[in-house]
Image (spheres, grey):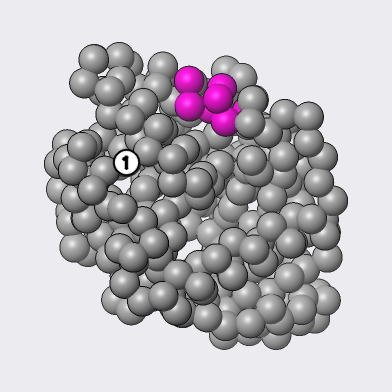
Amino acid sequence: MSVEVERKFVCRSDTETRLKQLGAQFVGERSFQDRYFDTGKFTLTLSDTWLRCRGACWELKCPVRAREGEEEEEGRERGGGQRKIKLCTRYREITELSQIVDRVRQVVLRERSGEGEREKEKEIEKEGGKEGEHSCKTEAEFEGQRERREEREKEGEREGQWERETDSAWLGEFALVQFASFTTVRRSYSLPGGVRADLDLVDFGFAVGELEVLVENPEQIPAAAEKIEELVEKLGLSEACKNRVPGKMDAYLKQFHPEHYGRLLSAHKLHP
C-alpha cells in the first residue's frame, strides 16, 4: 500500500504555463464529489483519519510519519530537510471496504476505551507499514496505480447513487455522519520523476494546487519531499509556499464548520 506524499501550493495565473515549460504532460480534467464522515465527537478526524466517499467509492486516508519517533509538536526548531517534510502531508489510502471498516473500528474502539491519541496513530502506521513491506514499484507502476484509482472513481460517478456500490449500513455501527460535501473540478499534469500536479477548483469558491509523489515506505518520504521542494522552486512558488498552504478541507471547515475547524487546529491536525 503506497504512501501519498503531498504538498499544497497557491495557484497563479501562469502556473499551467510553467508546468508545461518544465515538461509536464496534461493528463486531463474531471469533476468529482467528495462526502466526508465522522462521529459527533470528531473521533476520526482528531486522529487525522479521513473517511470519504468519492463518487461510489469509499476511501480512508491514514497518517504516516517519515520515520519512527518523528516529532509533530508545533514550534519546534527543525533543519531544512525536516522543514520540507513538515510542509508535506503523508497518508496511506485504503480503498478496500472491508479494510476501511476494520480500520475505522480500531480508531473508534480505541477512543472509547480511552487510549491516547499517539498510541492510536502509532498502531495505525505500524500496520500500514507492514502492508507496504517488501515491495518496490517503478515510476510507471505508480502512474498505473493513479490511473486505476481515477478510473475506479470515474466509474463510481457514472454509477450515480453512491449507495449502490457499498452497503452504508456500517456507518450506523460507529455513529458516523456526513460533515462535509463538495464538488471539485481537477486539471492534472504528470511530470518527470513521478510527480503529479493537480489544480483544483472547488464549488464553494476555493482554488488550490497539489504536488504528489507516491512512495512505497516511510523511509522514502524525505527523498519525495526533496523532489517536491525542487519543483516548487522551479515553479517560482517558494515564497508563497514557505508555510503549509491550506487545503480544501481546511477552507471548507473554516467557512462552514468553525467549531470542528477549531478543534482540529488545537489538535494540530489542520494548520492556519
What residue is shown at x 45% (from left), y 31% (from top)? 75
The image quarter in which residue 9 lies? bottom right
Q: Residue 230 location, x and y as percent? A: 76, 56
Magenta stretch: residue 58 in it? no
Classed neighbour count for the residue bearing mark 1: other residues with Cα under 10 Å, few (<14), some (14–19), many (≥20): many
User: What residue is disc 1 on?
Assistant: 45
Indicate left or right for 220 with 108 as reference: right
Q: Residue 14 location, x and y as percent? A: 63, 84
Element type at marker 1? Answer: helix
Q: Nearer the viewer, residue 191 or 129?
A: 129
Q: Residue 143 location, x and y as percent? A: 74, 61
Indicate left or right for 201 with 196 as reference: left
What residue is shown at x 28% (from left), y 23% (from top)? 109
- Disc 1 marks a residue whose amino acid type is Thr
Indicate left or right for 144 with 180 as reference: right
Q: Which residues are magenta?
A: 123-129
Q: Nearer the viewer, residue 2 or 45?
A: 2
What residue is shown at x 50% (from left), y 67% (from top)? 153
Q: Residue 154 location, x and y as percent? A: 51, 74
**Residue 11 visible, this angle:** no
**Residue 109 visible, this angle:** yes
